[in-house]
Image (cartoon, coloured by chain):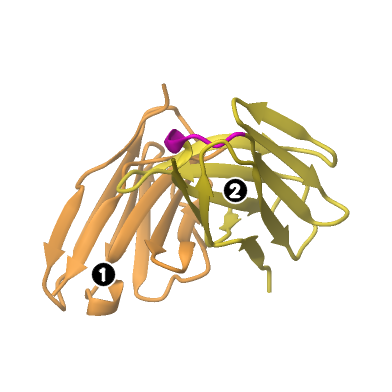
């Protein structure tokens, strides 16, 4: 079974803190993705990566950055967390031309 | 701007009834995905539709794709409570299994 593991299910952070969300996949997938999910807005793509050290902006990259130093790991970074970044964050991975497999999600609250 | 529109966004059904969820998209694509999400859980892949006219069925769910009309449907037959969930369609805009654009989801509630 494909496994996409997100390091935390729930996080509570303060405004202005630097926040790291980690995602690891065990299927040697080339592509990895970060989405955020908000009620009424569905899933929106923040960033994706199709190879180590490569990254592409999605629809809403502002306020976020990413890091992919190893193929299996894709990190989402909030440089200075703000309350409007309170959301559910979903990581996904896929091989080329294949379906995306999602992690369990991290519910982040920024106070 | 690419848009993926699902309707309805909320659907309350009685057990045993049939219904269809529609997914319209605004750009050329022949790859479309359907996902299911249970409350508090992550997304689970249901169907991958890879060409015009593709039809996939799993249990009481059947998905189809009409690329000329830019329309996919998810048909529910004889609904049961276990189908209560949120269903998302997603369009592959780069045709390469990379970035997906998701609809806002259809929340289905099946009651007896």
Estimate the x, y position of residue B2 in percent, counting from the top left. Answer: 68, 68
Q: Which mark is residue B62?
A: none
Q: Secondary structure at mark 2?
A: loop
Question: In percent of the image, x 39 and y 61: which residue is there?
Answer: A36
Give the magenta range.
B78-82
Estimate the x, y position of residue A29 in percent, counting from the top left. Answer: 49, 34
Q: Colour of chain B?
A: yellow
Q: Residue B8 appears in which quarter of the rendering?
A: bottom right
* Residue B96 visible, this angle: no
Q: Residues within 10 Å of mark 2 (few under 14, many from 20)?
A: many
Check the image and report above or below for B34 versus B68.
above
In this orientation, which residue lies closer to the viewer: A27 or B85?
B85
Per the model, the C-alpha gap separating discs 1 and 2 is 26 Å
Chain containing mark 2: B
- Looking at the image, residue A102 sits to the left or right of residue B45; the answer is left
Question: In percent of the image, x 43 and y 34: which residue is there?
Answer: B82
- Looking at the image, residue B7 sits to the left or right of residue A82; the answer is right
Q: Is residue A16 magenta?
A: no
Q: Colour of chain A?
A: orange
In this orientation, which residue lies closer to the viewer: B108 or A5?
B108
Dominant secondary structure (helix, strand or loop) of the stretch shown in magenta? loop
Residue picked out by circle 1: A86
Quadrant of the image containing the C terminus of chain A = bottom left
Residue that protrudes farthest toward the right in the picture: B68
Check the image and report above or below for A23 versus A14.
above
Q: Is residue B81 magenta?
A: yes
Q: Residue A46 appears in which quarter of the rendering?
A: bottom left
Estimate the x, y position of residue B107 in percent, counting from the top left. Answer: 48, 54
Residue that protrudes farthest toward the top in the picture: A1
Question: In percent of the image, x 60 and y 34: which residue is there?
Answer: B78
Q: Which mark is residue B98?
A: 2
Question: Given contact means CB atoms under 8 Å apart, are the residues at marks 1 and 2 in contact?
Answer: no
């Amino acid at each position: 079974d494909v496994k996409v593991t997100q390091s935390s299910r729930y996080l509570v952070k303060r405004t202005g803190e630097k926040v790291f969300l980690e995602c690891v996949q065990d299927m040697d997938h080339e592509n990895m993705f970060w989405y955020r999910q908000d009620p009424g807005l569905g899933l929106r793509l923040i960033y994706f990566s199709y190879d180590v050290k490569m990254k592409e902006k999605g629809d809403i990259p502002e306020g976020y950055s990413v890091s992919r130093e190893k193929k299996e790991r894709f990190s989402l970074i909030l440089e200075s967390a703000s309350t409007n970044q309170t959301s559910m964050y979903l990581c996904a991975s896929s091989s080329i031309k294949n379906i995306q497999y999602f992690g369990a999600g991290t519910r982040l609250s920024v106070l | 701007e690419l848009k993926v529109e699902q309707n309805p966004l909320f659907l309350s059904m009685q057990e045993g009834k049939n219904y269809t969820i529609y997914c319209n998209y605004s750009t050329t694509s022949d790859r479309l995905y359907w996902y299911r999400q249970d409350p508090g859980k992550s997304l689970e892949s249901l169907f991958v539709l890879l060409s015009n006219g593709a039809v996939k069925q799993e249990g009481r769910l059947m998905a189809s794709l009409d690329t000329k009309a830019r329309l996919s449907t998810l048909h529910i037959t004889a609904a049961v409570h276990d189908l209560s969930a949120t269903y998302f369609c997603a369009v592959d805009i780069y045709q390469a299994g990379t970035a997906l654009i998701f609809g806002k989801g259809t929340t289905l509630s099946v009651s007896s």
